[in-house]
Image: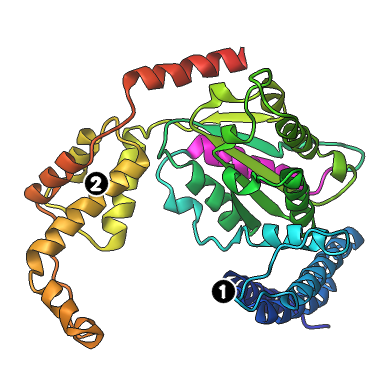
């Protein structure tokens, strides 16, 4: 009976991918290309263990996509500008596509965020998991089931929208494209539309993938607000990609997660492309307790104030503000117990490395100072505005 080596091969594949992504972040395109080629070869071996022809074909296609990425990096590395060591954009007819895709590759991030790293938001997590599961699971013969591939997360700042997207990629072992909308906007005529097309082309090749578009409202100003022809082309290109017009009958899975703090600014045509629009609210009591446990207990800190009391006192705080509150309390405690640390820094690296930081349970004074420094920023009026928009949007 043949030995099943799919597990060890997949582990080696993940290691090669990680090396490639780390080298890419260092702009070491030569090393990145070699690691991507290695990952491609391992994926071909892994394809032999596919349960059916469709799965084997998908893995072979992924291997071919990785080889193409490596080849593009090898081509780009020969066009490095000696002055600064970075590849110069040369969007001519021969190399333009490579350059756009190279810019997109720089948006890939390795995420270690898991679902358990996010306190609360269980229904939102379930929405994302459902979309992924329905897309990748086998369908009964003769039955078509459409999974949501476009999710819009909206709500007050700091409520965990970015963390949710990172966890979606990390928890689902998908390639994560973390895209600030400003990075897609360009002063060069027509470049933004090419970058958007390249983004989805690369994501489909590396499927399964998660594209996170943060500050989404910046990309899609309301129609009729005096937008330029270039802005209309950006919207039209994005509409086509969200519709999946370029990927009909394509088995690849790309989940687009848009995030915005101001959903009422979004174009109605764009909104209609999102099968799920999910309000990410301020954390409730159970979520605040979970967030406090993540940032205190799971990081080795104890508190003289019961967490239940801190949970009550953080009503109205966002998840990010609770994290900042904990960091502030810890900073005050460590500063109090380690008064000589600044002097050690002046003595050099070795002196600092030989010192062990002193800690103790966080006291009431530590938290009182933190509460004075970190205050909730979301007003009751803002919360009503989100609720009103949600009712109108769903109505």
In the rendered image, residue 141, in percent from the top left (x then y), is placed at 90, 43
Residue with the most extreme front position: 83
* Quadrant for the C terminus in the image: top right
Colour scheme of this structure image? Answer: rainbow
Dot 2: few (<14), some (14–19), or many (≥20) neighbours within 10 Å? Answer: many
* Quadrant for the N terminus in the image: bottom right
In the rendered image, residue 4, in percent from the top left (x then y), is placed at 76, 78
Q: Nearer the viewer, residue 279 or 372?
A: 372
Tag 1 secondary structure: loop
Q: Dominant secondary structure of the magenta stretch? A: helix
Left or right, residue 145 beside residue 12 = right
Labelled pair 1, 2 in contact (Cβ < 8 Å): no
Q: Quadrant of residue 233?
A: top right
In the rendered image, residue 91, in percent from the top left (x then y), is placed at 79, 58
Q: Quadrant of residue 227?
A: top right
Dot 1 or dot 2: first in sequence order is 1
In the rendered image, residue 104, in percent from the top left (x then y), is placed at 69, 57
Residue 290 drawn above or below residue 22: above
Residue 230 drawn above or below residue 68: above
Residue 129 drawn above or below residue 267: below
Tag 2 secondary structure: helix
Q: Which residue is mark 1?
A: 26
Q: Nearer the viewer, residue 13 or 261?
A: 261
Q: Nearer the viewer, residue 220 or 57?
A: 220
Residue drawn at 65 percent across, 57 percent down:
174
Residue 57 drawn above or below residue 242: below
Q: Which residue is mark 2?
A: 325
State which region is magenta. Answer: 122-140
138 is within the stretch colored magenta: yes
């Amino acid at each position: 009976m043949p030995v099943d080596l799919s597990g060890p091969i997949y582990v080696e594949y993940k290691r090669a991918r990680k090396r490639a992504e780390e080298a890419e972040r260092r702009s070491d395109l030569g090393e990145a290309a070699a690691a991507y080629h290695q990952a491609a070869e391992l994926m071909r071996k892994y394809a032999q263990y596919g349960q059916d022809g469709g799965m084997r074909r998908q893995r072979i296609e992924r291997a071919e996509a990785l080889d193409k990425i490596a080849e593009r990096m090898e081509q780009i590395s020969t066009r490095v500008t000696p002055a600064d060591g970075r590849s110069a954009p040369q969007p001519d007819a021969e190399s333009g596509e490579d350059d756009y895709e190279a810019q997109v590759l720089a948006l890939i991030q390795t995420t270690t965020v898991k679902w358990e790293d996010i306190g609360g938001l269980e229904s939102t997590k379930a929405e994302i998991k459902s979309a992924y599961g329905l897309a990748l699971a086998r369908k009964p013969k003769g039955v078509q089931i459409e999974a949501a591939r476009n999710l819009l997360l909206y709500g007050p700042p700091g409520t965990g929208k970015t963390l949710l997207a990172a966890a979606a990629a990390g928890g689902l072992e998908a390639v994560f494209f973390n895209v600030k909308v400003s990075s897609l906007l360009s002063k060069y005529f027509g470049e933004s539309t090419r970058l958007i097309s390249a983004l989805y082309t690369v994501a489909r090749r590396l499927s399964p993938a998660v594209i996170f578009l943060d500050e989404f409202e910046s990309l899609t100003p309301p129609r009729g607000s005096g937008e330029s022809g270039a802005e209309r082309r950006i919207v039209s290109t994005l509409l086509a990609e969200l519709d999946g017009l370029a990927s009909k009958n394509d088995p690849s899975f790309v989940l687009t997660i848009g995030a915005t703090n101001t959903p009422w600014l979004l174009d109605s045509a764009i909104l209609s492309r999102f099968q799920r629009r999910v309000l990410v609210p301020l954390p409730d009591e159970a979520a605040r307790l979970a967030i406090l446990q993540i940032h205190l207990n799971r990081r080795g800190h104890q508190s003289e104030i019961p967490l239940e009391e801190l949970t009550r006192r953080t009503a109205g705080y966002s998840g990010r503000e609770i994290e900042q509150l904990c960091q502030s309390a810890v900073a005050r405690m460590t500063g109090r117990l380690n008064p000589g640390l600044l002097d050690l820094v002046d003595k050099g690296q070795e002196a600092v490395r030989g010192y062990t930081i002193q800690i103790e349970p966080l006291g009431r004074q530590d938290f009182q100072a933190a509460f004075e420094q970190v205050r909730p920023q979301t007003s009751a009026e803002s919360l009503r505005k989100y609720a009103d928009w949600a009712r109108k949007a769903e109505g």
